Image (spheres, rainbow, N blue to C red):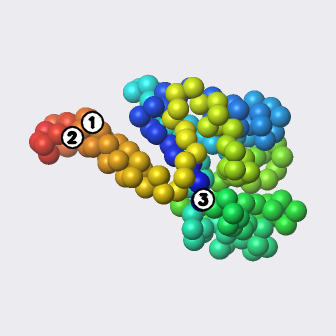
Amino acid sequence: MPKELLIDGENCVGCCTCEMVCSAYHEGIINPFQSRIKVVKWDRDGEGIPTTCIHCIDAPCKAICPVSAISCDEALARIVIDYKRCIGCRMCIAACPFGLIHFDSIRRRVIKCDLCDGDPICVKFCPYEALQYVDESALDSKKRRSSAEMLRAILRRPTGVTLGRETYNGQNGKP
């Protein structure tokens, strides 16, 4: 059964361990710019959440690649890049609606999560279990619950948006 990477935003503390082990595993150097996973941080709140390729079923990056260097590995349910074919045009970066393909300026090529050939290193080293590699069937209910909880937290968080002379606090629609 195919597996997927589950990201639990509630457990992530923004430590960036996943970025470090990813770049060390793939590039042999600890460099967050060469990592396939990126932690988006909200420093003011002391929160973070890892982001990485979600391996779309109808991947826009695959569809736009002019040399067919991006393909679907059905066995691992992932989207992969064939670097022998890739010409570095970066069209895939522009096509990704989530901004989850990156350009490695050192090696001069695009990079994205490849799920470490079915054994994601980031999952093994995450000290807070914010990353899990789970069966696709188990993912649906966990993902729905997690998404609903995150949306609820966002809706309850004060936004500090100024409307006229008053600041909207995000609760009950009242300033």
Q: Nearer the viewer, residue 73 or 38?
A: 73
Q: Check if mark 1's residue and mark 2's residue have beta carbons within 8 Å.
A: yes
Question: How far is mark 1 from mark 2, CA to CA?
Answer: 6 Å
Q: Quadrant of the C terminus?
A: top left
> Which residue occupies 83% across, 34% down?
28
Residue type of the residue flagged with mark 1: Arg
- Residue 89 location, quadrant: bottom right
Residue 36 in the image: x percent, y percent? Answer: 68, 45
Residue type of the residue flagged with mark 3: Pro
Residue 81 in the image: x percent, y percent? Answer: 76, 60
Q: Check if mark 3's residue and mark 1's residue have beta carbons within 8 Å.
A: no
Q: Quadrant of the N terminus?
A: bottom right
Residue marked by disc 2: 170
> Which residue occupies 85% across, 66% down?
85
Q: SS for tag 1?
A: loop
Q: Nearer the viewer, residue 160 or 152?
A: 152
| Left or right: 75 as drawn, with respect to 168 | right
Q: Residue furthest front?
A: 1
Q: Nearer the viewer, mark 3 or mark 1?
A: 3
Label 2 neighbourhood size at 10 Å, few (<14), some (14-19), many (20+)? some
Can residue 23 be seen here? The reply is yes
Residue marked by disc 1: 157
Residue marked by disc 3: 2
- Residue 95 location, quadrant: bottom right
State the count of labels. Answer: 3
Q: Earlier in the sequence, mark 3 or mark 1?
A: 3
Residue 151, above or below 76: above
